[in-house]
Image: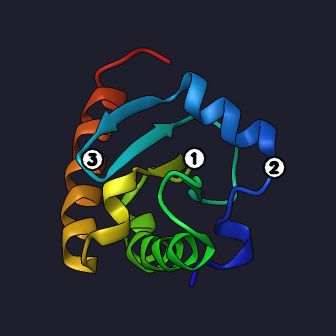
Amino acid sequence: MLPAGSRLTRRDEFASVVRRGRRSGRSRLVVHICGGAGDGGPRAGFVVSRAVGNAVVRHRVTRRLRHLVAPRLTQLPSDALLVVRALPPAADASSAELAEDLDAGLRSAMRKLSGSPR
């Protein structure tokens, strides 16, 4: 579970990360990350649209992603904002497959972020 202080909650925060951040796509999810957005430690948010499935499926995917992201937040820069967007294949994926895509997406997005001027 993500503590309340580690969550993105406002629409403008999500929009800013998706618009300004670095993106890395995988088969089941897309990772957006940006830095330089304040204090309080890294924060994360999730986008799981109706294209993924019905409400039960969407909530299951969100819970799995929250569980996977929580320990990885400590590996991010202290000012990082992260948005993880689930794609339709995430509905049928195991937690291990989601973890694999998340790790690969984070590595790629962090590499892009560190190589770009802010």
Q: Position of residue 43 (x, y in %)?
A: 60, 58
Pointer 3 residue: 105
Is disc 3 placed on a helix, strand or loop? helix
Q: Amino acid at mark 2?
A: Arg
Mark 3–mark 2 Cα distance, whole angstroms, equals 23 Å
Residue 80 in the image: above or below residue 44: above
Q: Amino acid at mark 3?
A: Gly
Mark positioned earlier in the residue sequence (3 or 1)? 1
Identity of the residue drawn at 23% across and 57% down = 101
Mark 1–mark 2 Cα distance, whole angstroms, equals 17 Å
Mark positioned earlier in the residue sequence (3 or 2)? 2
Please indicate whether residue 43 sits to the left or right of residue 114 in the image.
right
Q: Amino acid at mark 1?
A: Asp
Please indicate whether residue 53 sits to the left or right of residue 99 in the image.
right
Q: Position of residue 57 (x, y in %)?
A: 50, 75
Residue 4 in the image: above or below residue 90: below
Pointer 2 residue: 10
Residue 65, located in which quarter of the rendered image?
bottom left
Pointer 1 residue: 79
Q: Residue pushed farthest front? A: 54
Judge the density around disc 2: few (<14), some (14-19), many (≥20) Cα neighbours within 10 Å.
few
Q: Nearer the viewer, mark 1 or mark 2?
A: 2
Q: Residue pushed farthest top? A: 117
Identity of the residue drawn at 69% across and 51% down = 39
Identity of the residue drawn at 60% across and 59% down = 41
Q: Position of residue 20 (x, y in %)?
A: 57, 23
Judge the density around disc 3: few (<14), some (14-19), many (≥20) Cα neighbours within 10 Å.
many
Is disc 1 placed on a helix, strand or loop? loop
